[in-house]
């Protein structure tokens, strides 16, 4: 019988835990003691799940690795960021592989969901597990890969409504593993090739990043030529195969990271990619474009008599995630110039807001008369309806 443990309870791991806990006796592990404490109290600082949802599920939240050794299937959802030099940073994967190897038993199954470049599961993760545990993958324990497709803030494309890839090249408990994954997706696409599944994941995000980069470039050129960008897009969209992307700030953990993972393994194999990173420079440059628009707007306002607040600081609409947020970067740059300009985001947890010196209560907004909106959350839009007579500026 499968006894699952989800390792890493962030945006990817927690939804998996919530779904599997309905059918299996599941353990949730995270190395953050504070994260575990919060979840036990029914608090999700990412605001993806409410207290009622968290409390009613039957699960144990644990941050001591020895306490998950009775589990026999581990789903790994730890982050895979990049270093400042844009190289892949696999420290979290390395750490979790070292930890699992201490409790790894014969017949255990490990499924990695962290986004990686092709070959990491076999050439990096399995090597650590075998070396530390003295067990042999494919004989003593079994490894698979299932690229995560969690889209934070998107209620339409939740786990139960999406197709999910599962790469599991073993006969051992294959049907049981597939059955378990049927609770994590509308349809499970089974494959035996781990490397192909790893590749599919990164190119899903790269394709989107490149397309947004292209539309951002169109937006900048139209502005420069004094052409109405929205009208142009509406006209172009009348063609049946036109892809309608929106210009904007690209942040978060996936799109700003995955192109560098794929480029890294390409370069390592002496292949110079030409399009993979094409969206990165233009998408990153949008922060300066938006910042300049804000500063130009403020020059036209008599700010001596104005109280200014920059709203919506997370990387994406209706998501409480500040990682790689260009909105946050813009706010920080402007705040350095003028300490009187404040920041506010209704989705950010109170403790995190206090730590970043953001405004923590929507009631405090009544003191301001200039609102600059970067990430227009639904809840923020509703709040701003009360301030119709004040200056509200949407720079993009």
Image: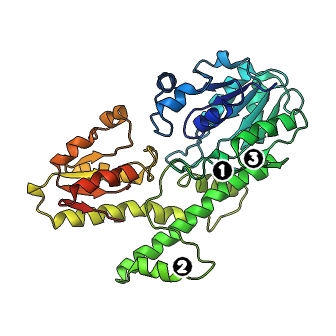
Query: Label 1 belongs to which residue?
Result: 161
Q: For the residues carrying marks 2 and 1, which lies nearer the camera in this image?
A: 1
State how far apart marks 2 and 1 are (Cα).
27 Å
Q: Quadrant of residue 5?
A: top right
Q: Which mark is residue 97?
A: none
Residue under the point 82% across and 22% down: 134
SS under mark 2: loop
Residue under the point 24% across and 53% down: 386
Query: Label 3 belongs to which residue?
Result: 119
Q: Residues within 10 Å of mark 3 (few under 14, many from 20)?
A: some
Q: Eyeballing the image, is 232 above or below 261?
A: below
Would residue 78 be seen by someone viewing this image from the given angle? Answer: no
Query: Label 2 belongs to which residue?
Result: 237
Q: Eyeballing the image, is 282 above or below 47?
A: below
State how far apart marks 3 and 2 are (Cα).
39 Å
Q: For the residues carrying marks 3 and 1, which lies nearer the camera in this image?
A: 1
Q: Residues within 10 Å of mark 2 (few under 14, many from 20)?
A: few
Is residue 265 shown left or right of residue 356? right
Q: Residues within 10 Å of mark 1 (few under 14, many from 20)?
A: few
Would residue 236 be seen by someone viewing this image from the given angle? Answer: yes
Image color mode: rainbow
Residue under the point 58% across and 48% down: 87
SS under mark 3: loop
Position of the C terminus by quadrant: bottom left
Is residue 26 shown left or right of residue 12? right
For marks 3 and 1 on the same chain, the one whose residue lies earlier in the sequence:
3
Q: For the residues carrying marks 3 and 2, which lies nearer the camera in this image?
A: 2
Position of the N terminus by quadrant: top right
For marks 2 and 1 on the same chain, the one whose residue lies earlier in the sequence:
1
Q: Eyeballing the image, is 143 above or below 140?
A: below
Q: Is there CB contact under 8 Å for labels 2 and 1?
A: no
Q: Quadrant of residue 76?
A: top right
């Amino acid at each position: 019988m499968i006894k699952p443990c989800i390792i890493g309870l962030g945006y990817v791991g927690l939804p998996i835990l919530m779904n599997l806990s309905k059918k299996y006796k599941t353990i949730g592990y995270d190395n953050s003691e504070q994260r575990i404490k919060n979840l036990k109290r029914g608090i999700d600082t990412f605001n993806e799940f409410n207290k009622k949802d968290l409390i009613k599920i039957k699960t144990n939240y644990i941050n001591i690795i020895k306490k998950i050794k009775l589990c026999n299937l581990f789903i790994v959802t730890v982050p895979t960021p990049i270093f400042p030099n844009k190289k892949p940073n696999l420290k979290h994967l390395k750490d979790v592989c070292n930890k699992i190897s201490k409790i790894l038993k014969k017949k255990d199954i490990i499924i990695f969901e962290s986004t990686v470049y092709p070959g990491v599961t076999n050439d990096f993760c399995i090597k650590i597990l075998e070396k530390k545990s003295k067990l042999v993958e494919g004989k003593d324990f079994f490894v698979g890969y299932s690229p995560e497709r969690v889209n934070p803030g998107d209620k339409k494309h939740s786990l139960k409504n999406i197709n999910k890839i599962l790469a599991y090249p073993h006969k051992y408990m294959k049907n049981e593993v597939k059955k378990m994954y049927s609770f994590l997706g509308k349809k499970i696409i089974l494959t035996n090739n781990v490397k192909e599944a790893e590749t599919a994941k990164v190119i899903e995000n790269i394709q989107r990043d490149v397309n947004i980069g292209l539309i951002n470039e169109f937006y900048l050129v139209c502005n420069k030529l004094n052409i109405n960008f929205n009208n142009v897009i509406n006209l172009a969209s009348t063609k049946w195969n036109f892809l309608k992307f929106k210009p904007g700030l690209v942040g978060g953990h996936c799109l700003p990271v995955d192109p560098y993972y794929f480029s890294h393994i390409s370069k390592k194999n002496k292949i110079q990619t030409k399009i993979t990173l094409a969206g990165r420079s233009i998408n990153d440059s949008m922060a300066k474009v938006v910042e300049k628009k804000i500063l130009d707007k403020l020059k036209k306002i008599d700010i001596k008599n104005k109280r200014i607040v920059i709203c919506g600081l997370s990387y994406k609409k209706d998501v409480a995630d500040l990682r790689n947020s260009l909105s946050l970067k813009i706010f920080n740059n402007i705040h350095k110039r003028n300490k009187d300009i404040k920041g506010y985001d209704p989705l950010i947890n109170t403790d995190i807001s206090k730590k970043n010196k953001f405004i923590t209560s929507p009631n405090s907004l009544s003191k301001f008369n200039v609102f600059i909106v970067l990430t227009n959350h639904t809840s923020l839009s509703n709040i701003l309806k009360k301030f119709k007579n004040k200056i509200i500026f949407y720079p993009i």
